[in-house]
Every structure is written in C-alpha cells, then in structure tokens.
Image: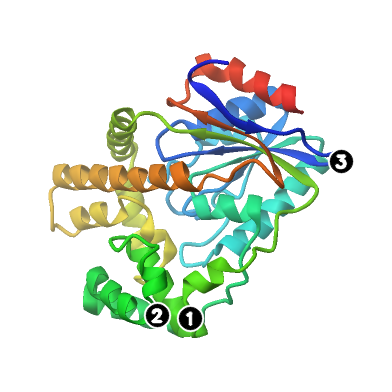
Amino acid sequence: MSETVVEADRQPPADGQIPVVVIAGPTATGKSTLAVDLADALHGTVVNADSIQVYRDLRVLTARPSPAEEARVPHRLYGVLDGDDRCSAGAWCDMALAEIGLARAQGRLPIVVGGTGLYLRALVEGLNAIPAIPDETRRATIELRETLGTAGLFEQLERWDPKTARRIDPHNPQRVMRAWEVMVATGRPLADWQDEPASGPPADVAFQIFCLMPPRDTLYAGCDDRFAAMVADGAVDEVRRVIDLGLPPDAPVHKAIGFAELAACLTGLVTLSDAIAAGQGATRRYAKRQRTWFRHQLPTVGGSVHSSYVVQEKYSKRLLSEFLSKIRNCH
C-alpha cells in the first residue's frame, strides 16, 4: 500500500451486486482524466456527477471532458440540459442510476466522477424525502437574498430556523437560500428533513470510492493554473454566448464558478486581468468548501459502499497502475 492511496476501509461486495467506481474530490485534481484512463483500461462508461457539467453551454468554463476524451470512451450526463433547466440531486440520481444500469447491460464498468458531494451522497446513501420547492417560492427567495444580501438572509434564517442555521456555512448563498426556501415551502426546518431516514441506496449496487485530496497548496495552485488556461481556451467567449441567450438571472448555468467574474469583464466593470484574479479566488474558495465537505462527509464503508480510499495527491499517470490493481482486486 502506497502512502498516496490510503485505504480507509473495505468489505467484500455482496453476491450479485453491480460494481460501480466513484471518483470524488475537489475541483482541479484530475478526476476527469483519471476516469477516462480507468474507462479506457477497464471497458468503462464515465457518468458525470458535477451539478454544472450537466449543462451544455459552458464546456470550457466548467472543465467538461474535451471532445477527444468523450470520443475515447463513452461519457454520459455531460451537457444534457439547457442552461435554465433545474436539476435536483434526486433528478440527477434517477438519471445516474439509469446510466449505471445501461452500462452494466452493455458489459461496461460504470465510473461515476464529480465533485458535487450532495449528488454523490444521494447516490450511495439515498435521499431524504424533501418535497419539491414551488417555483414562486424559489423566485421569492432569490429576490429576498438580493434585497438583504446573504448575511441578511442568514440573520433571518437564524431567527426562524436556528437548528438549520447552526449546520450551514453562513457565507454560502446557495446553502442559505436552500434552507430558507425549504422552511418557507414546507413549514419545517431543513434540518428536520435531513434528520429523517434516507430512502436508502439501491440494494444491487456496490460502490468503490476514490477521493482525490491533494495538499492545500497543491490544490490552490492547480485551481489558479486551470482557470488561467480556461480563459486562454475561450471561456470569455463562452460566457458572452450564454449572456446573449438572455436566460433568467437565476438560471443554474449562471452559477458556474467564474461566470460572474468574466461577465463583469464583458460589461466593462473590471479588466480581464482583474477578472482572472477574481475567478481564481472564487475557484480556490470553492475547492476549499469541497475539500472540507469530503473530509467530513465522504460516505463511509457499509451498506452499498464496500471500499473507500483517500488519494493524497492530484492524479497523474504514474498512479494509474495502483488504481487499476485496487479495482481489479475488488471486482
């Protein structure tokens, strides 16, 4: 066992369970490249678990696999939605399970890859039965946040739902708005819904999880380098094309990391160099949140998870043989 790929825990999959590999971790750690290399070697299908890469309009800015990578092995759930379509964890999970079943029917190994922790947890642990939020409630929440700011909305949340407020990052606008809209729409705190037993994972699936968690300095340097490369590869033009679509301000595709910063450059509010610096900062903050989430929330072995590994560096080709060995030994 190397010091880079650390086995967290392991149990043998049950008879008849479908093996599924999961590649998780923060952004800019090489997850997509690893998934393609594994799929190429193991006759696999790559299934996207990134909540923004499901949208078709921002291939470069969301670091979707390149056309050459997508041609090399089958890729599923990339660029399948319009920029103003809504995609919940439940909706994604249904699509992912369908793609997993199709891959196995074709004799291929499903390889789920992405950094959206809530999607991955929904897949391997099941979902809480939180009702769908009406569109009018969601719009009203967005308007309230625009009026009060994230800090002001969080103060209101602390007043009306202190239980959930204690659990979330007060500086994360999406988490604050989610807690508020659930409380308004259902009359119950989000924390209460989260405390209810989940629906449970599919009984016929056995997950093997690899989480890429390089040191913080390496992670942040990778974030900076990749954002600069995105701009060089045409991210600004992508953002311009999305703006020209005239989508609603709350369209999910607008939440892509770096979109707001590059949009500000296009409207003349900042220079391109300042936009790049701001986009790099936003990417580092996002990676920090992901790193914290995976450090504390990574699904543990038990139920549908039969093995889990933490990989203490970015992916590189020299690690491929070790990944392949661990996967083949389990399956």
Residue 5 locus on image (x, y percent): 53, 23
- Crowding at mark 3 (Cα within 10 Å: few <14, some 14-19, many 20+): few
Residue 16 is marked as 3
Measured Cα–Cα span from mark 1 to mark 3 = 41 Å
Could you say whether the residue bearing mark 2 is in a helix, strand or loop? helix
Of badges 2 and 3, the one in the foreground is: 3
Could you say whether the residue bearing mark 3 is in a helix, strand or loop? loop
Q: How is the image coloured?
A: rainbow
325 up-or-down from 182: above or below: above
Could you say whether the residue bearing mark 1 is in a helix, strand or loop? helix
- Crowding at mark 1 (Cα within 10 Å: few <14, some 14-19, many 20+): few
Residue 24 locus on image (x, y percent): 52, 39
Q: Report which residue position mark 1 lands on.
A: 135
- Give the amino acid type for the residue marked by disc 3 in the picture: Gly
Q: Report which residue position mark 2 lands on.
A: 139
Q: Residue at x 37, y 59 (%)?
A: 255
Of badges 1 and 3, the one in the foreground is: 3
Residue 240 locus on image (x, y percent): 31, 55
The answer to which of marks 1 and 3 sits earlier in the sequence is 3
The answer to which of marks 2 and 3 sits earlier in the sequence is 3
CB of mark 2 within 8 Å of CB of mark 1? yes
Quadrant showing the C terminus? top right
Q: Residue at x 14, y 57 (%)?
A: 268
